[in-house]
Amino acid sequence: MSLIRKTALAALAIFSSAGVTAMEQEAFDKAFDALPRKGAEAQLEALQDLRYQWLMESFPSWGTYQGYPGVNDRWTDNSMEAISRRREQTRRMLAASRHIDTDALPESRLLDHQLLYQDLLSEVKGFQFPEHLLPITHMSGIQRNVPSVLEAMPKANSADYDQLIVRLDRLPLLIQQTRTLMEKGLEKGITPPQITLRDLPAQIRSLIPEAAEESPLLKAFVTMPGSLSASQQKRLRNRAFALYHRELVPAWRDLAEFVERVYIPQARVDSAFTSLPDGTRWYAHKVREETTTALSPEEIHRIGLQEVKRIRAEMEKIIAKTAFEGDFAAFTDFLRSDPQFYHTSREDLMRDYRDIAKRIDAELPKLFRTLPRLPYGVKPIPSYSEKSQTTAYYQPGSLEAGRAGIFFANTYKVSSRPKWEMEALTVHEAMPGHHLQIALAQEVEDVHPLRRLGMYTAFVEGWGLYSESLGYDLGLYTDPYNEFGALTYDMWRAVRLVVDTGMHQLGWSREQAIEYFMDNSAKPRHDVTVEIDRYLVWPGQALAYKLGQLKIMDLRATAQQRLGNNFDIRSFHDELLGAGALPLNVLEKRMNQWIVSQGGQSASNPATESADPVAPI
């Protein structure tokens, strides 16, 4: 380690003592002033160090997931003062990244600089929009994040439990800060659509049952490690339970009542994101940020219509293969309603998911030379959020924190969880989808830890959707119903391009979007409704899946065409995943260089190359 880097890290160490309000201005000033003024590589490395520690300590929940030391007793300071302070600090880091002479950087560090600069620039551009005034939805917010963070915390000894209790003690302040932001949002007419908030009070109240031991907040105190003596366990449990009844229950109850009596009645009725102040520009920014392309909402809508038409034709071929007597609507109704396609218990549903995952694992070496060391598990979505949660999701693990990745499957209302969707869903969320890609990104060697944090939605979710197409190579989709299920999931992501842009840009109603989804998919109405409400509160995010998949498939087709017999699928996948998650414009450049290195010619796509956001604000 260079002396310059040691000096910068020594200055950064003052963050560790900053307590619950980490990253005070004076502390940041000292660390920033310690950055080297000469030597491009030293400047870049020191700025990466600063950015990484700033992220971990400004957002302690993220630090917990990463196994970062010293942050497990605090939450993010979401006061208006802290938000303003973090924005100014981000602007200063962006300015510092601009002063690095990229011509003097080794070629191996150019990608580091591009990603650092691009991320900071995108974040600063977003400051023109009041995203902080939307701190909670039915899909995200403290009622969802807090239990997950507490679950991820280490619980090996008394010191770990002491930190957990301190964090619980500081939770009422976080709840109050969230409410303050919601109140400011109401004043400015910035809220989620009213229709999407219907389950939010129940979500909050589910955290505070009368019996403390039944609360998701206190799971760690019900079953405690054997390393703690009986007296230690009793002492810690009593402290946590007393805190729960004295501080946590009233704080969460007040928030639930505020949501029910004030927030929901005053929330906006118009569901389009563009109905918000400056909403058209805000939506365009979110689309660009999520997709890492320069495509407009109208262009994406047209791509979606084309994909829906293409996939629908493939689905009709499957229907013909089954010899089903009836049209598309009748066939999808058959898939939604026939008992043969559904489990009768949660336990059976989870057993089948685990069986599929095990079958997939044995086939992976056919497609990948490099597999992650980190294992993964398959668990049901927690009961406190299952009703309004999507069909499944993946939670990354961490070797540093000693935590496996988890594929969470929804077992709520098993009569709405068809068997024919399970193979495609497992491929997407577990292997070779999210777990393989994210775990490999965490295990990339010889890169700065900051690089391992990259979670560009278009890459991560594009890879997950692309992985579904690998199911055929993995021995899946062997009957027409599972094959139709895979196409249903591909259609699901194509429909997203149409309905997300339709609702937020082109004036579609929520009901119109639901019916379009139902007309082109076999997914049950409950799932469709949950999905549409997701797009309403996460505008633009769902566009990244299909656009990312299309880019990866385009890159694969290009490599196959230009390399011919020299194309190797395992080498292609290793190269694609080898640098971690990347913006699509950066990915395209990287893969074109790889094609040339393998003896082929490069190719480019103006749609993504023009998305390079490395330009003046």
Image (tube, rainbow, N blue to C red):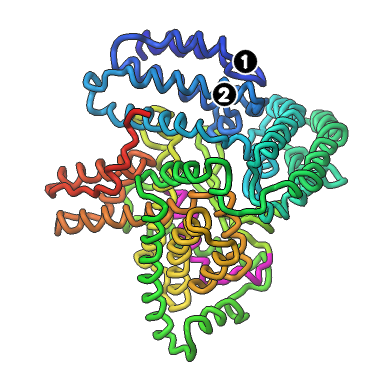
Residue 84 relative to residue 565: left or right: right
Q: Give the structural element (helix, strand or loop) at label 2.
A: helix
Residue at the (56%, 82%) spot, across then down:
334
Q: Which mark is residue 331?
A: none
Quarter of the image where one finds residue 498: bottom left
Where's the N terminus, which quadrant?
top left
Where's the C terminus, which quadrant?
top left
Q: Give the structural element (helix, strand or loop) at label 1.
A: loop
Residue at the (49%, 46%) spot, across then down:
280
Residue 175 appears in the picture as rendered: yes
CB-based contact (under 8 Å), mark 1 and mark 2: yes
Q: Which residue carries the number 2 mark?
A: 57
Residue at the (67%, 65%) spot, across then down:
346
**Which percent across, then down, holds residue 116?**
38, 28
Q: Which residue carries the number 1 mark?
A: 18
28, 284: nearer the viewer: 284
441, 609: nearer the viewer: 609
Main secondary structure found in the magenta portion? helix
Residue 214 relative to residue 528: left or right: right
